[in-house]
Amino acid sequence: MSEPRPPDLEALDRTRREIAGGQEKGRAAFTSITEWKEGARSISQLRGHSVATDEPQALGGQDEAPDPMELLLAALGSCLTIGWVKQAELRGVTVRSLKITVSAPYDLRGYLDLAEEVRPGFSELVYQVTVDCDASPTLQAEIMAAAERSSPLFDNILNGTPLRGVLAPPEA
C-alpha cells in the first residue's frame, strides 16, 4: 500500500500569493441548497456534490443517511484533518496515518421541547487525534494548535458565527 499524498502546498501557496495582492481577492462565499424529499430526508447540493440527510427511526426518519448533527461532527473532523496534514507538511513532518474522532453528547429533551433549560444541540464537542508521524509530542501539539487556528469550521463553532434566517416567497 502506498503512502497517502500530502496536500498540494504549491497550489495553496499560489492562492496565498494571489490573495495577498489585495483584500478583495480573498473574499468568497459557499452556498448550499437543501431540498426536502420526504419524511425527515433531504438532499443538499454543494458545488455539484450531493449530501443526503435523514433522522434515525426513533426521531421520525428512515435512517437512510446521516443526521444533520452528525454532518457537523464530520465537517469539523474533516476540516481539522486538512489542517493537520497541511500544517505537518509545512513543517516537513511525514504523516503516515491520521484519524480524528469527534464526539458530542446531547440531550433529546431539548430537541423534543420537553425541558426549556436543555439546549436542542450538543452540550460540547470533543475531538481526539490519533496520528502516526515523525514529529515529537511538542511538535505535534504545535501542529494541533496551528490546525485549530487555521480551521474555518473550528472558528465558526468556537466563535459562534452570527446566524439569521430570511423567508422567501415560493419560486414560480
Image: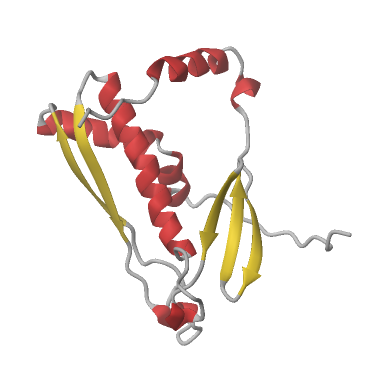
Identity of the residue furthest to the bottom in this view: 114
Identity of the residue furthest to the left in this view: 136
Residue beneath the point at 62% across and 29% down: 27
Q: Is residue 92 above or below residue 143?
A: above
Residue beneath the point at 24% across and 45% down: 99
Residue 75 position in % (x across, y down): 43, 49
Q: Number of callouts in the render? A: 0
Residue 62 position in % (x across, y down): 49, 76
Q: Is residue 49 visible?
A: yes
Q: Is residue 6 above or below residue 102?
A: above
Residue 124 position in % (x across, y down): 34, 62
34 left or right, relative to 70: right
Q: Nearer the viewer, residue 149 or 140?
A: 140
Q: Nearer the viewer, residue 66 or 24?
A: 66
Q: Quadrant of the N terminus?
A: top left
Identity of the residue furthest to the right in this view: 172
Q: Is residue 111 above or below residue 94?
A: below
Q: Quadrant of the C terminus?
A: bottom right
8 left or right, relative to 96: right
Residue beneath the point at 30% across and 26% down: 5
**Based on the displayed image, in which of its 4 quarters is residue 131 positioned?**
top left
Q: Nearer the viewer, residue 57 or 81?
A: 57
Structure colour scheme: secondary structure
Residue 17 position in % (x across, y down): 51, 12
Q: Is residue 117 visible?
A: no
Q: Is residue 60 above or below residue 164?
A: below
Residue beneath the point at 22% across and 28% down: 2
105 left or right, relative to 42: left
